[in-house]
């Protein structure tokens, strides 16, 4: 109930971090989340900060808002957020940045909560949603790559 995609970018981790951790820019990269805004006076990616994303599922619909909580925020290294209740997210999205000699390997990943409902969902629809998520993560990372290079 998880997946990941890694793309190498010819840019330093700090430059990439600025893009992946600024949720207000997600609409420029994601094929599903077309806008996001910080909540409760938050202005940036601190652990515990909340934001909401405006999602167009599968690029077609339904369209809905979802509330997220920042779970990891290590500049130049990692940014992660949970979708749903802050203490028990249903899905955690993560960006990990690994410096290499000629740039940065950027890995975007997701991991669904290990609950009976999510296991049933994954058993019935996981093959399709997993493919959609991998394609979406690749699209997101390739769009970020085009901007930083």
Image: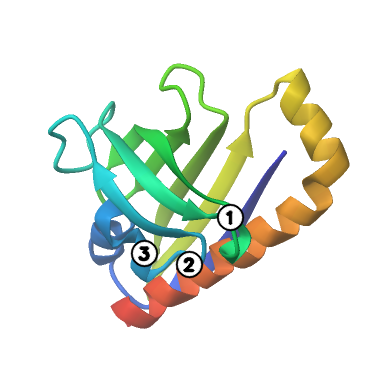
User: Dot 1, crowdedness within 10 Å: few (<14), some or many (≥20)?
Assistant: few
In the displayed orientation, state which residue is furthest to the top. Answer: 87
Residue 144: image location, x then y, percent:
38, 72
**Location of residue 113 with respect to 52 vertically, above or below:** above
Looking at the figure, which quarter contains the N terminus?
A: top right
Residue 103 falls left or right of residue 63: left
**Location of residue 89 with respect to 126 vertically, above or below:** above
Of residues 114 and 106, which is closer to you in this image?
114
Residue at position x 82%, y 52% from top?
127
* Residue 136: quadrant of the picture: bottom right
Q: CA distance from mark 1 to mark 3?
A: 13 Å
Residue at position x 51%, y 66% from top?
31
Residue holding disc 2: 140
Residue holding disc 3: 27
**Location of residue 110 with respect to 22 vertically, above or below:** above
* Mark identifier at residue 57: 1
Of residues 125 and 92, which is closer to you in this image?
125
Residue at position x 44%, y 16% from top?
87
- N-terminal label among 1 and 2: 1
- N-terminal label among 1 and 3: 3
User: Dot 2, crowdedness within 10 Å: few (<14), some or many (≥20)?
Assistant: many
Residue 90: image location, x then y, percent:
57, 29
């Amino acid at each position: 109930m998880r997946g990941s995609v890694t793309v190498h970018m010819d840019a330093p981790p700090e430059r990439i971090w600025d893009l992946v951790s600024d949720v207000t820019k997600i609409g420029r990269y994601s094929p599903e989340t077309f806008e996001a805004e910080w909540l409760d006076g938050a202005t940036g990616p601190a652990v515990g900060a909340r934001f909401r994303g405006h999602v167009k599922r599968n690029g077609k619909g339904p369209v809905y808002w979802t509330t997220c909580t920042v779970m990891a925020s290590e500049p130049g290294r990692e940014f992660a957020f949970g979708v749903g209740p802050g203490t028990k997210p249903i899905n955690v999205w993560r960006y990990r940045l690994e410096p290499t000699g000629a740039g940065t390997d950027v890995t975007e990943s997701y991991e669904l909560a290990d609950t009976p409902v999510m296991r049933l969902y994954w058993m019935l629809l996981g093959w399709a949603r997993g493919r959609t998520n991998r394609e979406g993560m690749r699209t997101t990372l390739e769009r970020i790559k085009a901007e930083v290079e």
